[in-house]
Image: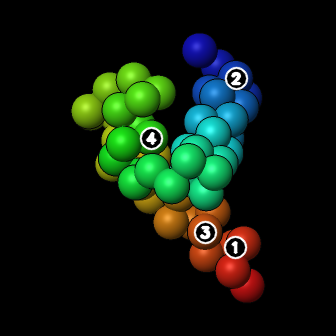
């Protein structure tokens, strides 16, 4: 997958996780499990979520 495509997928998944956390009151881990994000990719999404949350709070 090209970098642009992967970036779009990553952004979409991060937004989906945030939405699920807010609307369904799920933990980050529960969201990733529901979205079937592989274990080896979860740390990467965790870091993206931290960055996104920091931006949205400022």
- Where is mark 2, residue-wise? 5
Label 2: which secondary element? helix
Element at label 1: helix
From the top left corner, tell me how far across and down residue 12 is, in percent: 68, 35
Q: Crowdedness of circle 4 by 10 Å Cα count: few (<14), some, many (20+)? A: many
Task: Note whether residue 49 is visible.
Answer: yes
Above or below, 55 relative to 33: below
Kindly check if marks 1 and 3 are in contact, taking CB atoms under 8 A apart as contact: yes
The residue that mark 1 highlights is 55
> From this viewpoint, which residue is outermost toward the left?
39
The reply to whether residue 7 is visible in this rendering is no
The quadrant where residue 41 appears: top left
Secondary structure at numbered mark 4: helix
Select label 1 or label 4 by which is in front: 4
According to the picture, the residue beneath numbered tag 4 turns out to be: 31
Q: Are marks 2 and 4 in contact (CB under 8 Å)?
A: no
Instruction: Name the residue rendered at 42%, 29% in the picture.
Output: 34
Scheme of image coloration: rainbow
Q: Of the residues under marks 1 and 4, which one precedes in the sequence?
A: 4
Q: Are marks 2 and 1 in contact (CB under 8 Å)?
A: no
State the quadrant of the N terminus: top right
Question: At 69% across and 80% down in the image, what residue appears?
Answer: 57
Looking at the rendered structure, which numbered label has been put on residue 53? 3
**Real-space Cα distance between discs 2 and 3?**
22 Å
The image quadrant of residue 53 is bottom right
Give how far apart the Cα atoms at labels 2 and 4 are.
22 Å
Which is nearer the eye, 15 or 1?
15
Q: Is residue 5 above or below residue 54?
A: above
Whole-percent x and y of residue 39?
Answer: 26, 33
Comes first in the chain, label 2 or label 3: 2
Quick one: label 3 or label 4, which is nearer the N terminus? 4
Q: Look at 72% across and 72% down and name the residue there.
A: 56
């Amino acid at each position: 997958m090209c970098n642009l495509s992967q970036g779009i997928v990553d952004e979409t998944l991060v937004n989906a996780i945030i939405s699920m956390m807010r609307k369904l009151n799920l933990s980050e881990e529960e969201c990733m499990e529901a979205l079937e994000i592989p274990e080896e990719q979860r740390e990467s999404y965790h870091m993206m979520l931290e960055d996104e949350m920091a931006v949205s709070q400022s």
